Amino acid sequence: MKNIAIITTVLLTFLLVGCNDKPDSELGQNETEGVSKTEAMHGEEGHDEEEGGHEEEGEEGVVELTTQQIETIGLETKTLEKRNLGNNIKVTGNLELFPQDMANISPFVGGNVRSIKVIEGDKVRKGEVLAYLEHPDIIGMQQEYQEKNDELVFLKQDFERKQTLYDKGVSSGKEFQMAQSKFRSTTSSVNGLRSKLRLLGINTTKVEQGEIFSAVPITTPISGYVDDIMVTLGDYVATQTKMFTVSDNSKIHLDLKVYEKDIPKVKVGQKIQFTVASRPDELLSAEVHSIGKTFEEDPKALHVHADIDNKNGDLLPGMYVEGRIIQGKKSGFAVTEEAIIKEGEQSYVFIVDEDEAPEENKMKFKRVPVSIGVHDLGFVEINLPADVSTDAKVVIKGAYMLSSEMIKGELDHDH
């Protein structure tokens, strides 16, 4: 019995020691895991805070470029301007010339081209020589004029002498009438030849004095520009064959089509703004001069003519035109469509950031959100945030490149 009691006592002692060790080890493990989890949570929060800082920097939307980068991109800025948009009649048409401002030049007599004095595009004045034609018939016409003119001098003297004799009753009436008839017919021939030579540009006074011209000048009846030359040296040109075309582009006008529903809205004197393909970013002005009275069936439209200022000759006949006849005065700040950057539903423009002085040979651009309105003639109406000055310089070319540079800068910063 004594041995059994000793064994029982030893077993109980081992069991108690095992129970005390087990909670300690479990508590220690839990504490370690708790610390690890806490540190991990703090680490994640710190990482999130850093990421949040990057996003704030990206939202500032400022891009800085060097002068060289600006030139490479082809970036252009322009002070914000107000334009008339929206409340207008949309029209299309072409630039045209009135018939009296165009000339197809052809000779009054056939001949060979001896010389050409102009090239296409030359500016010429009314009466200026464009070319010379020569032909034996031209010489023969002058010789005939000299002979008839000399004969006329004799016939005039003979007629006057016989008239005197007839009046005195010395000469018969038949002789007087024959002299009178011959004098009058020769006078008619001389006058006809003189008119022809003058029409050809030949000085008849010099021809009467014995001078003969071997060639005749071809002159322009209007001032303007040489559009086409249809002859070369040595060509034989028949009468009424077109040799040159000259046009006076300073008097170019708009020929617009106004559709039936808009006809009652158009009045003489209304202002027009229009663009041409060669100058898409420039709004040109015109004024309604006359409204046609003939209605076209296909399409159902009326022609409207408008005067424009083309003193520089930059606008040419045949150019396609998109325009607006202004009904009312609805103006607002507007930029070209190229200046607008779209990100989802939000629109932006870039302006020159003048809040801080940039470094030398550098320039900063700030992206600002805008709300957009009317689209008209390649321009878009915009409303700027209240804190942006209306005198701001807006990027009108290169905005998408700036946007790409800004996104690239944000990605590099995140890495």
Image (cartoon, rainbow, N blue to C red):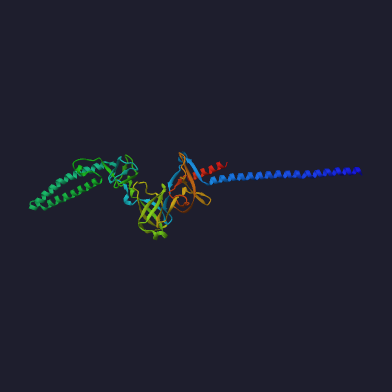
Q: Residue furthest right?
A: 1
Residue 24 showing in the rendered view: yes
Q: Nearer the viewer, residue 74 or 4?
A: 4
- Name the quadrant containing residue 235: top left
Percent coordinates x, y for residue 229 in the rendering: 34, 43
Percent coordinates x, y for residue 65 in the rendering: 48, 41
Q: Residue at x 54, y 45 (%)?
A: 58
Residue 171 showing in the rendered view: no
Q: Is residue 369 left or right of residue 168?
A: right
Q: Nearer the viewer, residue 336 or 316?
A: 336
Q: Is residue 34 left or right of residue 174?
A: right
Q: Which quarter of the rendering shows the N terminus? A: top right
Q: Nearer the viewer, residue 282 or 125?
A: 282
Percent coordinates x, y for residue 23 in the rendering: 76, 45
Q: Residue at x 53, y 42 (%)?
A: 409
Percent coordinates x, y for residue 213 in the rendering: 24, 40
Q: Residue at x 88, y 43 (%)?
A: 7
Q: Which quarter of the rendering shows the C terminus? A: top right
Q: Is residue 124 left or right of residue 194?
A: right
Q: How many marks?
A: 0
Q: Is residue 3 left or right of residue 407?
A: right
Q: Residue at x 55, y 46 (%)?
A: 56
